[in-house]
Image: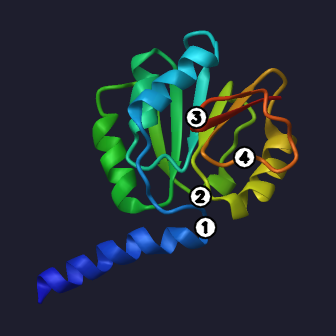
Amino acid sequence: MIFFWISAVITLLFCFVVFFGAPYLPTFKKDLERIFRIVKIPTKSLVIDLGSGDGKMLVIAAKKGYRVIGYEINPILWLISNLRLFKYPNAKVKLKSLWRADVSDADLVFTFLLTKYMPKLEKKLQSEMKANSYFASYVFELPNIEVTKKTNNTHFYRF
């Protein structure tokens, strides 16, 4: 019986986030590595991952010497990310909605967000992103801003 309740809670935690952003879907490491070959930002730059999931992007960026902040609403994924980031003092993940994230100091913002949320995110980015910063969107495009570069899975924007 306890196994049933634990399974039910875990399932609910993974399902409820669909109402706020996107379900957890892993990204490919090669695609995340490619982002940093395309977007040239200095070491110590701030990289923010909106909906950071299991922290894979955060670990890659932290290893490269960037300051990284992830925002994750799923407590299980937040915990996994914190465990993965334990040895990186330049990285942290907040248990917080991406909609409440402050991206105004970011040099690069990354997300993997569903199409239906992109117009709202676009407004947030337009009002908060600093000049000459980058936004990388995995799979889905912003509706009204011109893509500056595109790979198989990632759309890049310059603000």
Q: Residues within 10 Å of mark 1 (few under 14, many from 20)?
A: some
Which element is circle 1 on?
loop
Which element is circle 3 on?
loop
Q: Which residue is mark 1?
A: 20
The residue positioned 84% from the left and 51% from the top of the image is: 123
Between circles 1 and 2, the one closer to the viewer is 1
What type is the residue that disc 1 sits on? Phe
- Residue farthest top in this picture: 42
Report the colour scheme: rainbow
CA separation in Å, label 1 and label 3: 26 Å
The residue positioned 30% from the left and 37% from the top of the image is: 84
What type is the residue that disc 2 sits on? Ser
* Sequence-first tag of 2 and 3: 2
Between circles 2 and 3, the one closer to the viewer is 3
Q: Which residue is mark 2?
A: 97
Q: Which residue is mark 4?
A: 141
Q: Position of residue 40 (x, y in %)?
A: 64, 12
Task: Examine the rendered structure and indicate whether residue 30 appears above or below residue 123.
Answer: above
Check the picture and name the quadrant holding the C terminus: top right
Residue 125 lies in quadrant: top right
* Sequence-first tag of 3 and 4: 4
* Sequence-first tag of 1 and 4: 1
Between circles 4 and 2, the one closer to the viewer is 4
Q: Are marks 1 and 2 in contact (CB under 8 Å)?
A: yes
The residue positioned 86% from the left and 42% from the top of the image is: 126
What type is the residue that disc 4 sits on? Glu
Q: Is residue 74 visible?
A: yes
Q: Position of residue 2 (x, y in %)?
A: 13, 84
- 64 relative position to 149: left or right: left
Between circles 3 and 4, the one closer to the viewer is 3
